[in-house]
Each structure stands twice: as structure tokens, then as C-alpha cells.
Amino acid sequence: MDLDVFVTAHRAEWDRLDHLLHRGRRLSGAEADELVALYQRTATHLSLIQSTAPDPVITTRLTQLVARARATVTRRATWRDAVRFLTAGFPAAVYRSRYWWIPTAVLSTLLAAVIGWWIGAHPEIQSAIGAPDDLRQMTRPGGEYETYYSSHPAASFAAQVWTNNAQAAAMCLVLGAFLCLPVIAILFVNVLNLGVGIGLMSSAGRLDTFLGLILPHGLLELTAVFVAAGTGLRLGWTVIDPGPYSRRTAIAQQGRAALGMAIGLALVLFVSGLIEGFVTPSGLPTWARIAIGVAAELLFLAYVYILGGRAARAGETGDVEALDRSAELPTAA
């Protein structure tokens, strides 16, 4: 291969690629397609030169061009992407799912209260849960319900709680595609555990102590679980009724948003884990611990309804950028 002839024939393409890659330049759709095509051709040119007529100057230039083009085409995540996700994508996704997770939260809370009342009002149900001595050991002052939150060092306990809750939330989000059934099962187990605690502690006359231990971290923690469950149920319903899109397109759109929410909810649960590890077992007065929990909950709701509502009204869905997903064409309903 005559290198001079080859360079003369293709220099204009390399210069054009370099021009398109100029930092800060916003590309149109046609220019983006052109960039991809030039990137592929330049990569081929580099391979030919390296194998037939290696020239250090030309090879260096093309290597740098191909590397820059690859970074642009693959769109590596940046801090700007992270900021956009936290200030728009995640809160908008939670906001748009509110018609699923708010009813989930209300019904779950009512069910936990009913289970708690049922257990507290029926000694025979308590006997089926455990032996009387064991139940007294759990509910007495300084018993297992109270010492649970201080049984391990705060940092390791917070990490353990965060890991367990993040796994439960992720399972709700991912398993929702299986027609909602796994989500309902996971949610029921959480509600049942809460109801049992309410029932046993109320029967021992210590419901106020139980709520003082649960509310500081539980408000934010349960909200995150309800958001995950509601989003999982929404994903499961999309399998049944994809709406105006093809089932594949609708599931892909909701699934991408759900996976993004898993990351956001992990951060929310990290905060609730810190509260559970450091605030709940602390020596602060009960009112102060509950006030911290209420403040964290109100901040999260403001974050969702103010930032998320604004982003949702601007068209944000919580899905990935348009360049990172395939085209979506509506189909007949």
C-alpha cells in the first residue's frame, strides 16, 4: 500500500471526524450518524496502516482520533450524568410512579394496623406466635425489641440494615416483571413483620416504646420499600397491559426506569440505615428521634414533589438518554 496516496485519499475524512469531535460541539442527528460512520471507517484505516505500512506519526494521530470517537459513541458516564440523575431522573421517576406507590403505602399501612390489632386483641394468636415466656422476653423493658437496635456497633449495624433493605427494594423492582406476584409476597412479609411487632408490643402495653423505635428510621425506610413495591407492581402491570406501545418497548422503558430507581432508592435506604444505626438506639429523647425521622421523610417527599414534579412536567421520565436507547414507535392500541 502506498501510504502517501492512502493518506491523501482519506485525510479529509479524518479532518471531518476531528471537527465533529471538537469539544463542546452539539451534534444534530445527521452529524451523529456521520460521526459513527467516520469512527468505523477510521478504525479500519488505522488497522490497515498498522498491518501494512506502520507510520508512527499517522498511527498516533489515528489512534487518538479513534479513542476520542469511541469515548463519544459509547457515552461514558460522567459527573454531569450523575447530577442529572439525582436532580431530575430519579425524583421524576418516583413522582411519575406516585399513583402506584402511594396506594401501596396506604393499603400496606392499614393492613399492618389491622394485623397488629388482631394479634393484640387475641391472646390465642399470640400463643401461636410463641411461648408466653418468649414473648415476655421480647416485649419487656430492655427486651429483644429494644436491644435489637443496639446489639451491634452502629456502623456495622447500619451497613447490614442498608444491605438487607436495598436487596429487598431491588427484588421488588426487578421481580415485578413476573406479573406482580413476587412483589406482593415480599411486601406482605414486611407488612406482616410490622404488624406482629405492633400487636405484641401493644398487648404488653408498650406500643409507644415500639413506635418510638420504629418511626425515626421506619418512615423513610418504609417509604422507599413502598416506592420499590409500587414501581415493581407498575412494571408487572405493563407486562399485562403495555398501553399504546408494543409490549417489548413498554417493558424496556419501564424496566430501564426501574433499574435506575434501584440506584436512587439504595441511596435513600442508606440514609435510613444511618438513622437506624446511629439515631434509633441513641440516648436522644423519643421526641427528638422521631423528629429526625419526620424531617428526613418530609425532605424526601419535598425532593420528589418539588424537583421530581418539575422534572416530570418538563418531560423527564427517569429513562436513559435518547441516544442510549433504541427508537420507540407507537403501535395501534
Image (cartoon, rainbow, N blue to C red):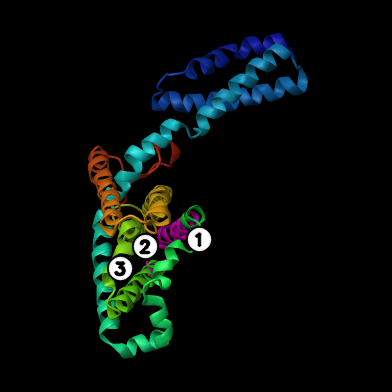
**Earlier-in-chain disc, 2 versus 1:** 1
The amino acid type, in three-letter code, at marker 1 is His
Query: Marks 2/3: CA distance?
Result: 38 Å
Q: Secondary structure at mark 2?
A: helix
Number of the label disc, if any, that sits on residue 304: none
Q: Residue at x 43, y 19 (%)?
A: 24
Q: Residue at x 48, y 24 (%)?
A: 34
Q: Residue at x 29, y 57 (%)?
A: 285
Quarter of the N terminus within the rendering: top right
Q: Does the segment drawn in magenta span residue 100?
A: no
Label 1 neighbour load within 10 Å: few <14, some 14-19, many 20+: few
Residue 255 shows in the view? no
Number of the label disc, if any, that sits on residue 152: 1
The amino acid type, in three-letter code, at marker 2 is Gly
Label 2 neighbour load within 10 Å: few <14, some 14-19, many 20+: many
The residue labelled by disc 2 is 236
Q: Secondary structure at mark 3?
A: helix
Magenta region, mostly helix, strand or loop?
A: helix
Residue 145 placed where, x, y %?
39, 70
The residue labelled by disc 3 is 209
**Earlier-in-chain disc, 3 versus 1:** 1
**182 w.r.t. 228: above or below:** below
- Relative placement, left or right, of 7 versus 85 is right
Residue 85 placed where, x, y %?
38, 39
Query: Marks 3/1: CA distance?
Result: 20 Å
**124 w.r.t. 148: above or below:** below
Q: What segment is highlighted magenta in the picture?
A: 159-181
Nearer the observer: mark 2 or 1; the answer is: 1
